[in-house]
Amino acid sequence: MSTGPSLRVRGLRKVYPSAPPVVALDGADLDVHPGERLAVLGRSGAGKSTLLNILGLLDTATAGDYDLLGVPVAALSARRRDTLRADALGFVFQASHVLGHRTVAENVLLKLTTARVPAGRRRDLVDQVLHTVGLSARTHALGATLSGGEKQRLALARAVVTGPRVVLADEPTGNLDDGNAANVLHLLDRQAAADVTVVVITHDPRTARWADRVVELADGRLHRVEGRP
Ligand code: ADP
């Protein structure tokens, strides 16, 4: 494990080969350290999803360097990228993608099964993470019966149950009222306190105020935002 930044990005460039080609990232630089909470702002079309997909090993850059936990990802085979993604990263999206016809516990179990966590450890991990996100009482409820805030807490439970070193979140509080947004941010705080790196893409001023550092994506580059929105 590297002692440097968990995410290190240099000169990142992404060009979509459409007609005409779209330059979504044009020399982005970024360091994010263990335990840091970073918010990424940017208008629609600024390249935020593109950046998150590359940081999340869901897409590759056209040029530039990206090291995740000290590993230069450009050199990895597809198989090793998949392994690194499953081992190191947790994802939270605005839409929680909770499976409505499965119970809360099954929603989390499915993630552990996909991550090939040994069967004997799964039940304890589910109980622990549901306790952490305050959903123990809803363990056997169907996903469809959860409120919006509960669904987002379940999404967070799924993202962190495998113990990722980095959590990447896309508008995790976008659909939530103040109370539920505060709950989700508090859960992300607990991750950061455990030295997990938390990167959140957001339009939400509540989330930008919460972050340790705010950067804005504009003209394909990342700019530091000094004052808080
Ligand atoms: P944001 O998430 O900030 O709204 P995106 O990363 O989705 O921005 O998009 C950045 C730019 O890249 C936009 O101009 C968008 O239209 C373009 N883009 C995104 N995905 C593709 C694609 N698959 N092919 C062509 N252009 C794309």
Image (cartoon, rainbow, N blue to C red):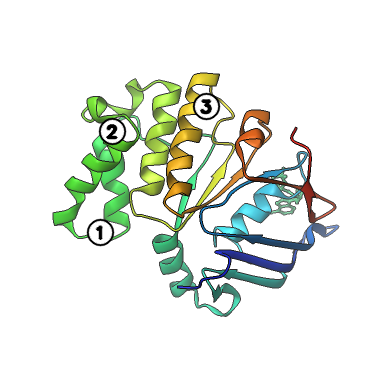
Q: Are there few (<14), some (14-19), or many (20+) residues within 10 Å of tag 3?
A: many
In what element is the residue under mark 1? loop
Q: CA distance from mark 3 to mark 2?
A: 20 Å
**Could you tell me which quadrant the N terminus lies in?**
bottom left
In this orientation, does residue 141 appear? no
The amino acid sitting under disc 3 is Ala
**Labelled disc at residue 104:** 2
Earlier sequence position, callout 3 versus callout 1: 1
Residue located 40% across and 29% down the image: 151
In this orientation, does residue 202 appear? yes
Residue 34 x %, y %: 52, 58
Residue located 28% across and 52% down the image: 112
Q: CA distance from mark 3 to mark 1?
A: 30 Å
The amino acid sitting under disc 1 is Val
Q: Which residue is mark 3?
A: 181
**Labelled disc at residue 117:** 1
Residue 79 x %, y %: 44, 73
Q: Nearer the viewer, mark 3 or mark 1?
A: 3
Describe residue 136's horizontal placement relative to residue 185 as left or right.
left
Earlier sequence position, callout 2 versus callout 1: 2
Residue 23 x %, y %: 81, 59
In this picture, is 74 found above or below 147? below
Q: Are there few (<14), some (14-19), or many (20+) residues within 10 Å of tag 2?
A: many
Earlier sequence position, callout 3 versus callout 2: 2
